[in-house]
Image (cartoon, rainbow, N blue to C red):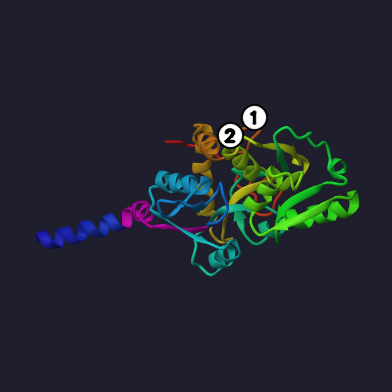
Amino acid sequence: MINRFAAVAAAILLCASPVLAQEGKPLRTAVDGSFPPHAFPNPAGGTQGFNIDLFTEVAKRMKRPITIDAVSFSTIIPGMAAGRYDFVAAPTTVTKERAENMLFTSGYLWTYFQFGIKKGSKPLTGWADLKGKVVAVNKGTPYETVSKAKGAEFGFEVQAFDYQTDAVQAVLSGRAYATFVGNTSIAYIAKQNPMFVPDLGLKEGRLHWAAAFPKDNPKLRNEMQDVLDCMKKDGSLVKLYEKWIGPSEPDGLERTVTPGYGVPDMPGYDPTPHELKCG
């Protein structure tokens, strides 16, 4: 009789507690493990960075374990499409083309192009100020593509390096006037080196960085956005930003809760109002 009662009770618990079962299921994701300050090797072992801390905390608040692989970014989105990953934890720029094939949370950071210069150099006001100068970039990146097109237009030289650290060193040694990369990388480099300062940011072209999900899983997208929005509201996302990147700006997405689920005006956006419940 006791065994029969136990079996019935267990069956009732199993049927009545899908949330508990979901809570214990690990989240599987990945980052580009060579992209400071978002994810990069920890000398003590493993991977560290803003996105590691961010999604470890997100999983904790969702009451789910998480595994974060450090791989090449080019393999992450195909890995999610193949079912290896539940979402993309690497910073992913939201574009119309991508949003037609994936679901996104609202943005948790802005991303835009920015220059960095040596402390004491004259700040840039536009591309024309670079005429006759040298810009150092990371080889094979959008920063190289954009700066070479602008170099041909405005008359400056572009030197491409295998690593962003080498591009920065070219600026600090005087071999280049500026480096051209993303705003969070510029802020992180400046935080590490007082002789390097952030300069002109091309904010008119800024885009959302957000977490990406398969099109058939709006439930997980919505649950994770709720957690991210709660982290914006309680200031913990701003604290992570300031820990890894630098001072948070008043209109930063790390502190701004946008309406609906997803990025407004992008495919996959759900404008339905919802009450945010933060535990």
Q: Front-most of 147 and 32?
A: 147
Residue 207 is a magenta residue = no
- In the image, residue 120 lies at what x, y percent? 73, 32
Q: Which residue is mark 2?
A: 255
- In the image, residue 10 lies at what x, y percent? 23, 58
Q: Front-most of 188 and 78?
A: 188
Point 76% across, 42% down: residue: 202
Give yes or no for contact between labels 2 and 1 (Cβ–Cβ under 8 Å).
yes
Q: Earlier in the sequence, mark 2 or mark 1?
A: 1
- Magenta span covers which residues? 15-31
The amino acid type, in three-letter code, at marker 2 is Arg
In the rendered image, is residue 179 in sight?
Answer: yes
Point 54% across, 67% down: residue: 79
For the N terminus, which image quadrant? bottom left
For the C terminus, which image quadrant? top left
Which secondary structure lies at badge 1? loop
Point 57% across, 39% down: residue: 192
Q: Residue furthest left?
A: 1
In the rendered image, is residue 223 in sight?
Answer: no
Callout count: 2
Q: Which residue is mark 1?
A: 250
As measured in the structure, the alpha-carbon distance from the residue carrying label 2 to the one carrying label 1 is 8 Å
Would you say 84 lies left or right of 186 here?
Answer: left
Residue 19 is a magenta residue = yes
The amino acid type, in three-letter code, at marker 1 is Pro
Decide: few, some or many residues near mark 2? Use Cα within 10 Å; few <14, some 14-19, many ≥20.
Answer: many
Q: Residue furthest top?
A: 250
Would you say 65 lies left or right of 128 here?
Answer: left
- In the image, residue 142 lies at what x, y percent? 73, 56
Would you say 140 lies left or right of 17 here?
Answer: right
Q: Residue furthest bottom?
A: 82
